[in-house]
Amino acid sequence: MTRGRTALGTTRATTHQEAVHVYHPEQKREENPLRAGLQLERVPDPCVIVVFGATGDLTARKILPAVYNLRRAGLLPAETTVLGFARRPLSDDDFRDQMRTAVEEHSRVPVEDALWHDFAEGIYYQQGDFADREAFRDLAERLEQIDAARGTSGNRLFYLATPPSAYAQIVAHLGSARLQRQHAGGGGGGGSHGWARIVIEKPFGHDLESAGELNDTLVSVFDESQVYRIDHYLGKETVRNLLVFRFANGIFEPLWNRRYVDHVQITVAEDVGVEGRGAFYEEAGASRDILQNHLLQLLTLVAMEPPIAFEADALRDEKVRVLRAIDPNWTEARARAHVVRGQYTEGWVGDQHVPGYRQESEVDPESKVETFVALKLEVQNWRWADVPFYLRTGKRLPRRATEIAIQFKLPPLMLFGEATTPPEPNLLAMRIQPDEGIMLRFAAKVPELGLDVRSVNMDFTYGFSFTREAPEAYETLLLDAMLGDASLFTRADEVEAAWGIVSPLIEIWRNWDARSEPDSEICFYEAGGWGPDQADRLIEHDERRWRRL
């Protein structure tokens, strides 16, 4: 048995044989020196993963493929079981057939017949209505039967892959059936005692008040240590590596502050529209869908102080401190000066002509819901005073891309005034998707007579350097939840702190729309562009410009 460290520094135990199987079963590990000595996370205790909303899209596209890939990688024990719970009348075999099709369509690795046969023996289905308390008593009995048949020792991971409107009801009925109970010692890493944990998808509430109410409902049934609020961006490899990059490299951490950093840009760009989810998006908009969670989560990881340990609460303590250092008191003047909200009209994305947002199905023809948000925030603490953070997200932009860009200040004295082309400021860009990697821009002399200075890039990509595909975010997060590691999940106070920043802004927009103020109307941008012109003016007002992706 060997021991290694994960990206977050937690010691994991594994066998050499498991390491070979997971990372590249058809090659020797030593073929790529960057992969030499890689170790696996330890295998969690056997458990039953109860998926509420098991016949929905999320289960088919993400959850079941992730569980299958973890099993294929040797990271789950053979006893691990999936129990789907939904309203449709299906047999176990019907559900298994549906999940086989889903995994074949959405898994990042091919389905192996022999492995699937063994894996499918641990897939079951339970018909029930979320509103029916008796259905949860039947669920409790079924779980006891599975524990006896499969040896899952009373360990349960409840996954709410349902509309948010069902969360409170499911939690209450889990409590009435006493399914939240766990034996002493079951709240942490498992062990010989049964544990119970619950995973909840975003959006976690639709404003500060509703998030607080949902938190109250959860902690009335579950202990906070049992609750795993999932944001899939936190499972992406580059996001996890950001902490390693910052705190394991002595050449960057001393520069990570207001003395050397000019500004930070965080972009989450999507080339798709609402994809048939018009009704959902009419309720959410870009502010609730992306800003409150993904964008603010990325900001906290960039701006946080070093935690005292790479442990869940230590990490989350520092993230909460960042959120509390952002002024939540939005005035109308500040909102006009520092925020732009936009909505796409018809246009071209690539070679495809697409309709405007108001022409999408289930969307109000006069909707004022934002599909684009750009804003300037300041983290008012010692490290980041006077360093602006520019955030933007939008749909129907030219390409799908998520990136964190840290632009450094120019040297205090430019010695190369005679250079033909003055160099651009140094820039560190962390690509989260696609082509996960890190790029560093610096100045270099052109190899010719005279003195010409140009900006050049050093580019690192995970796939090229480690010659293997990174795991999907849901694989990472599901494994951590089964291991009892909450480092990459958000805590109650973290969620409420984020809503405390976004909710007042949404309320100002609502008031503007009710008054139909001409200077506060939503800004339109053509599909296939990088957002409204007002977003460019937002950053250009500070004599900066958006980075072209």
Image (cartoon, rainbow, N blue to C red):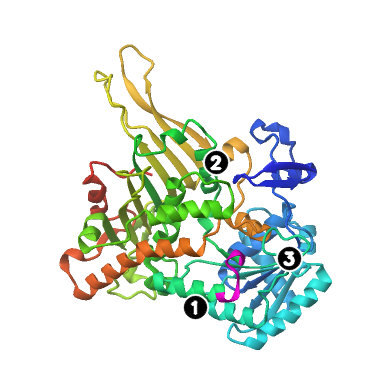
Which sits in the foreground, 139 or 469? 139
Which labelled disc corresponds to residue 244?
2
Tell me, yes or no, whether the two marked residues, 1 and 3, touch with CB atoms within 8 Å. Answer: no
Q: Which residue is mark 3?
A: 47
Graded by Cα atoms within 10 Å as few (under 14), some (14 to 19) or many (20 or more), the crowding at tag 1 reads few
How far apart marks 1 and 3 lie (CA) works out to 27 Å
Residue that appears at 40% across and 42% down: 405
Between tags 1 and 2, which lies in front?
2
Q: Quadrant of residue 94?
A: bottom right
How far apart marks 1 and 2 lie (CA) works out to 37 Å
Q: Which residue is mark 1?
A: 165
Q: Amino acid at mark 1?
A: Ser
Residue that appears at 56% across and 69% down: 57
Give the magenta range. 220-226
- The residue most toward the left is 518
| Position above or below: 416 against 369 | above
Which comes sooner in the sequence, label 3 or label 2? 3
Which comes sooner in the sequence, label 1 or label 2? 1
Left or right: 8 as drawn, with respect to 286: right
